[in-house]
Image (tube, rainbow, N blue to C red):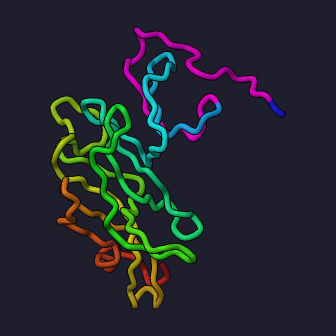
Amino acid sequence: MAVSVYPTGTTIYDPTKCWNGYTIFQASMFNGDEVGAILIDMNSNVVNQWKGLDGIPNKMLPGGYIMGNTGTRNQKYGFQDQLDIAQVDWDGNVVWKFNRYQRIKDPRQKPIWMSRQHHDYQRQGNPVGYYVPGMEPLVDKGNTLMLCHKDVSKPGISGTLRVDDTIIEVTWKGKIVWEWICREHFEELGFSEEA
């Protein structure tokens, strides 16, 4: 068994030369345990962890809330398809969740609703995805904009069902109020015939 020669945790920390704060990241394993989302301080001390909350990415919200997802579709059938997008409180209690974008039937599985969210989302109030003074995301209301997958067809491109990227806007109550589908704008993207 190979042993790393590199130290773990914070190796150099000079508070006078840093923007001090916290770091949240996805940790599949930490000290031998499955973790989920983990929040550390500048000395690598664990401030909080949310078991079972994954993130592509995890995002902190004001008041100790965190967003991520509570499950991922089997990658044999859908790469980076999250089952939902959820907001949990400091103790890990789900306070908001969306999973009703597309009902999926994978081989030998019962059909289930999924968000199919991947890679990015923004809660109303903060358009940039990280802390900006005066641009705080809403935590108990507001819409969420998210990047998702959707199975669609476009005969001019392919005669078979394909996965496409979409952007949807969802209300706090889970209603989709806007949807942008890439295939509907394919001609605007300027691809050559070869592409």
**Residue 91, magenta (yes or no):** no
Residue 135, percent from left and from top: 18, 36
Residue 63, percent from left and from top: 25, 30
Q: Is residue 52 above or below residue 15?
A: below
Residues shaded magenta: 3-31
- The residue depicted at 55 percent of the width and 18 percent of the height is 10
Answer with the quarter of the image where residue 165 lies.
bottom left
Answer with the quarter of the image where residue 2 lies.
top right
- The residue depicted at 55 percent of the width and 14 percent of the height is 12
Left or right placement of residue 113 versus residue 174 in this view = right
Looking at the image, which residue sits at the far right? 1
For the image, the number of numbered tags is 0
Considering the whole magenta stretch, tell me its main secondary structure. Answer: loop
Q: Is residue 126 above or below residue 158?
A: above
Answer with the quarter of the image where residue 107 lies.
bottom right
Left or right placement of residue 155 versus residue 63 in this view = right
Residue 37, percent from left and from top: 46, 37
Quadrant assignment for the N terminus: top right
Task: Out of 66 and 155, give the one closest to the viewer.
Answer: 66
- The residue depicted at 50 percent of the width and 16 percent of the height is 43
Q: Is residue 190 above or below residue 29?
A: below
**Residue 7, magenta (yes or no):** yes
